[in-house]
Amino acid sequence: MTITPSYLCNRLGRANTQEDDRRCPSAAAAERAGYRPCLRCRPETAPFCPAWKGTKSTVERALALIEAGAFDKGGVDALAERLGMGARHLSRLFAKHLDASPLQVALSLRLQRAKRLLDETDLPISVVAERAGFSSSRRMSVVTAEPTDSHLNPAGTVHGGLAATLLDSCMGLAILSTLEKGIGQTTLEFKISLVRTITPETGLIKAEGVVLNRGRRIGTAEGRITDRDGRLLAHGTTTCLIFQR
């Protein structure tokens, strides 16, 4: 806060040339010393107040709303409306300050919330998914990967073992999502079919498992691998043994 004779000014970049210029840590300190605003700037935007932080303050408000569950019942448009701005502008602010979209931040917070519930409670995964803000426990049985040159086989395409690993994982997670905490599962057998060639140029691929049947000792599930355009790349089925840990 720059102090000039009888005035206080928030312009911190350059001091005036008066001999009695001095600085105070806040507008309140300057006012207590008997100075008043020069009205060329706004004392309410002094350091450490919300307006001083500018757009970062808006992002912090958005994060607080997301943490409170704003995305559980609405999307980016609803969140932006609560903040009094457009969805595109809000997305630009998130990209500037967090290098991520509002949806990506919300998903990250949901995953953190789910992990805390899994670690600290005995709730089944289906309940954890609901309380973490996921619309369905099926979201807990999705596995993604981005093929690289390290996944190539001698023929120059992605080795089928990557597809097998993704399918085995997502199908097992689908079965696990129906079990109480303390109950485990392991694969007895699984079968996969490769429909399309996968290469590093395919980009991000997603494997999602769905339960077909789950009894007390045996569970069955199916899984699908798709690319970013939703095209089927591979599919499979599994049979899992259910046991007490």
Image (cartoon, helix red, strand yellow):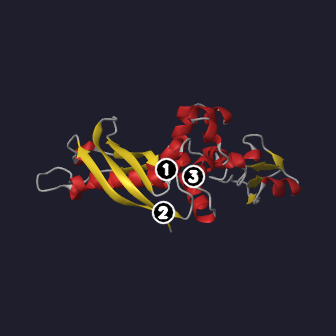
Kindly identify which numbered label has been placed on residue 184.
Answer: 2
Q: How busy is the neighbourhood of tag 2: few (under 14 within 10 Å), some, or many (20 plus)?
A: some
Q: Secondary structure at mark 2?
A: strand
Visible in this render: residue 207? no
Q: Give the amino acid type for the residue marked by disc 3 in the picture.
A: Leu
Q: CA distance from mark 3 to mark 1?
A: 14 Å
Kindly identify which numbered label has been placed on residue 140.
Answer: 1
Q: Are marks 2 and 3 in contact (CB under 8 Å)?
A: no
Which label's residue is closer to the chain start, 3 or 1? 3
Q: Residue at x 51, y 39 (%)?
A: 92
Where is residue 163 shown, x and y percent of the image?
28, 51
Q: CA distance from mark 2 to mark 1?
A: 16 Å
- Nearest the viewer among 63 and 177 is 177
Q: Give the amino acid type for the residue marked by disc 1 in the picture.
A: Met
Where is residue 74 shown, x and y percent of the image?
61, 35
Q: Is residue 202 above or below residue 23?
A: above
Position of residue 203 in the picture relative to residue 242 (left or right): left
Q: Residue at x 73, y 40 (%)?
A: 40
Q: CA distance from mark 2 to mark 3?
A: 26 Å
Kindly identify which numbered label has been placed on residue 157.
Answer: none
Which label's residue is closer to the chain start, 2 or 1? 1
Which label's residue is closer to the chain start, 2 or 3? 3
Q: Secondary structure at mark 3?
A: helix
Q: Nearer the viewer, mark 2 or mark 1?
A: 2
Q: How many marks?
A: 3
- Nearest the viewer among 105 and 36 is 105
Q: Which residue is mark 3?
A: 109
Q: Give the amino acid type for the residue marked by disc 2 in the picture.
A: Gly
Q: How busy is the neighbourhood of tag 3: few (under 14 within 10 Å), some, or many (20 plus)?
A: some
Name of the residue lying farthest toward the left:
155
